[in-house]
Amino acid sequence: MSMFRIAAAATAVSLALGFGQMANAESAGDRAVAAAQKYSGTTLSLHSEAGLQALGWELWNAQQWKELTGITVDQTSAPVNEMFVTTVQDFRGPANFDVLDVAPAYLPDLVEMGAVVPVNDWMDQFGYWDDYNDIAGAYKGWGEYKGKVYGFPDDGDVHVMMYRKDLIDEDAANQSEFKEKYGYKLAAPTTWKEWDDVAQFITDKYGPDIYGAAQPRAKGLTLYFWMDMFRDYGGRFFDVETMNCTWNSEAGVSSLSDFVEQRRYMPPGADAWGFTEAAASMLNGHVALHYTWPGVGRWIQNVGTDIEAMNWVPPSHVEGKIGYAVPPGGTPELAVGWIISVASKSDNQEAAYLFAQWSNSIEVSTGKTSLGYSIRDPFRVSHYADPGFRNLWSNAGQYLDALKTAGENGVQDLTVIQAQKYHDLIDNAVQAAIGGEDAQSALDTACKSADRVTKQIGVDRQRDVYKQFAAQENAYR
């Protein structure tokens, strides 16, 4: 039985049993449902990322919430790189949104402009702190700013590596040939040099049928992979005293140059691949290493792709042949991620909060993060340990362990005032280098523009926010 059908059955059982009054409700999710029933007939507007994120909200959350509370959830969505702009536009009016998916990097901006509200008092009133404290430490701070909680981390977006264990761990001939050529044991790569060696070895031996590696490298995505490498190479985003941009440092140039050169063991055209194209290359068995967001790790095992909305995902030809590990460098990007927040101009703030509490609760989020059609990824301590999740396929435990370790050691997206502008400049620089521009020149140009942005914001103001970011354990490792 698919996870979708299991979830539907579980919901039906819950409805049949009914929920008691809030005072007798046993879980944070139940308490939210009981409290929200007085708002039956209300319509909430949810703004989320387009694509599979929107599908997850529609099929998993909105339908159940309507059945449980009588509250309708209407949805608008936008591409990931337009989410901040569309959220700000709504705040400036006319305001329509009630519930917001907020990328952590943009929370300082939204708090400072007053677009989201703190939720601490509701967490007290509706008993949410135990569930909140179950959120893994890597993500828990995402929704916090200047001592208040402005939303619930709801998506464990951390990059994870998938690799062909049949070719790397289990093939005796490959083990012998690799050891003879490179002088060390063939295994899932833990450094960027090992990644290069393993990918090149696979390409040399199996290409063009199987290439060494693939990852999303299209515009709007490459910045998240380079920001990881940049810090692995020792890079820092700014000089904390002057706030001058330092992306064009030796660490920046070296990491970007190496990033571009990785194309030598990737399939033709891979530089233009987005998330789905790169994933398809792994599912079709055409690459040996894949470094991306966690959702692909479920598709590879043909988990949750058996519904009509997922018929565009090719059947996996490598089911049972894939291992999971932390990506090279050991400090993967906590890339994008999402927080559920309440819009400050909502006319239904309490109802919006209760929907967020229920959606983010342990039980509901465990179901959603184990689905194939939702790319909401595990983010709770209880998710990593959940027996049902760990038995979804033969090595689901290895998948969850890799996500847990990756999160514990991951690095946060650059999070400052007007982070979107800096992210766009980084992305432009990476794309320019992929397009043939010298890495030093591309980063010099980006830094000149970044310095102008910082001056427009105010050096002292930006320094204060950057210091808060840089002081976090997961800003630099």
Image (cartoon, rainbow, N blue to C red):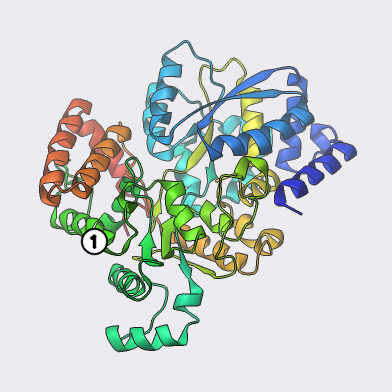
- From the top left corner, tell me how far across and down residue 165 is, in percent: 50, 74
Give x and y (percent) for residue 29. 72, 39
Is residue 354 toward the left or the right of residue 335 in the image?
A: right
Locate the N terminus by quadrant: bottom right
Query: Residue reaching furthest front?
Result: 208
Question: Residue 190, percent across and down?
Answer: 37, 71
Q: Residues within 10 Å of mark 1 (few under 14, many from 20)?
A: some
Query: Above or below — where is 348 with respect to 469?
Result: above
Residue 442 visible within the image: yes
- Which residue lies at the image location 50% right of the left edge and 59% below the top edge? 284
Residue 124 can be seen, yes or no: no
Q: Which residue is mark 1?
A: 233
Q: Nearer the viewer, residue 426 or 170?
A: 170
Q: Nearer the viewer, residue 120 or 331?
A: 331
How many circles with numbers are drawn on the protein? 1
Where disc 1 sits, the SS reads loop
Q: Amino acid at mark 1?
A: Tyr
363 lies left or right of 281: right
**Residue drawn at x 46%, y 47% as measured from the top left:** 276
Residue 248 screen position, x and y as percent: 14, 49
Question: Which residue is at the far top?
Answer: 94
